[in-house]
Amino acid sequence: MADTSDIASALIAKLGSDAELLSLCPNGVYWDEAPPGSTRFVIVAFINAIDRGVFGKRAIEEGIYLVEARMLSTVQGANIKRAAARIDELLEDQPLTVAGYTWSTMHRLEPVRLTEVDEVDPSIRWNRRGGQYFVEMSLIGA
Amino acid sequence: MAILTGRYGQVLWDPAGTTPVAIISLNKWVGNFTQEYEDVTCFLDPNRVYIPSLPNREGTVGGFWNSAELAIFEAAESPTPGKLELIPNNTEPTFKWTGLAYMDRSIDCSLQAPTVTGTWKAAGPFLLEGGV
């Protein structure tokens, strides 16, 4: 049985199993939010999603995912440029294996690069870099 | 009776013209059954006057390209018509247009999932069963 959540899980697993990305973002890869105290991590989140049907069933699931590295500006040696590049190497046109689905495409729609002022301490910054990735999976049997 | 969704529409086809089976990966069909009229307006008529000729029976079916489903493309290669059934909603399977038809085909490939269209034309009586 195809489960949409498994697509996000596969995405997180793909990123979270890469040694280079984890060396750049040692706190890990998370859905929506990282644990308190994290300073270098990757966030995966939904931006938008749409299902496309054929007669009688869902056939294609399209999702736009925000995938970005987030790093606290005060961390020594933080390399967000390389982290974003590594995310792109892992995702751009790379297959995603998910039970119940056939991978169709995964590619970036647009890059993301933001600087965020910390709400608690305005003297520090959060750097965010990555992209919006389009993931299209076809349901097997549709 | 009620207004029903198109989600459970169906297109069935048999190249041999006997027992149609569902074509998968489709999500659209169109039947153009418009009536043709002949203009028989005469001198002194207060307006144009028409008499009906024969109704049209042609249309399209459409959906996604699926390499496991080549019925439309195989049909288009056939010199003989197959049996086509067009069902608005398969929870009312007795209401359907059916008959022999020729099928033509096209594919639209862009950066999205490729879509296919089959263009059909009646090869004989193509009638609504279950009503009218």
Image (spheres, coloured by chain):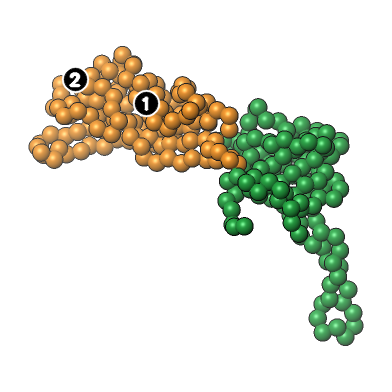
Chain colours: A orange, B green
Q: Nearest to the eye among marks 2 and 1: give it.
A: 1
Residue A56 figure quarter: top right
- The residue positioned 62% from the left and 57% from the top of the image is B1
Residue identifier under label 1: A9
In the depicted view, which residue is nearer to us: B57 or A85? B57
Indicate the chain on which mark 1 is placed: A
- In terms of depth relative to the viewer, which is nearer, B23 or A114? B23
Please indicate, yes or no, whether residue A111 appears anywhere in the rendered image.
Answer: no
A137 sits to left or right of B125: left
Q: Position of residue A84 (x, y in %)?
A: 32, 26
**What kind of residue is marked 2?**
Gly
Image point 81% across, 50% down: which residue? B126
Q: Look at the image and tell me in which quarter the C terminus of chain A lies.
A: top right
* Discs 2 and 1 share one subunit: yes
Q: Which residue is mark 2?
A: A77
Q: Which residue sits at x=19%, y=20%?
A: A77
SS label for mark 2: loop
Taking the view exactly as shown, the residue that stands out farthest to the front is: B1
Which mark sits nearer the N-terminus, 2 or 1? 1
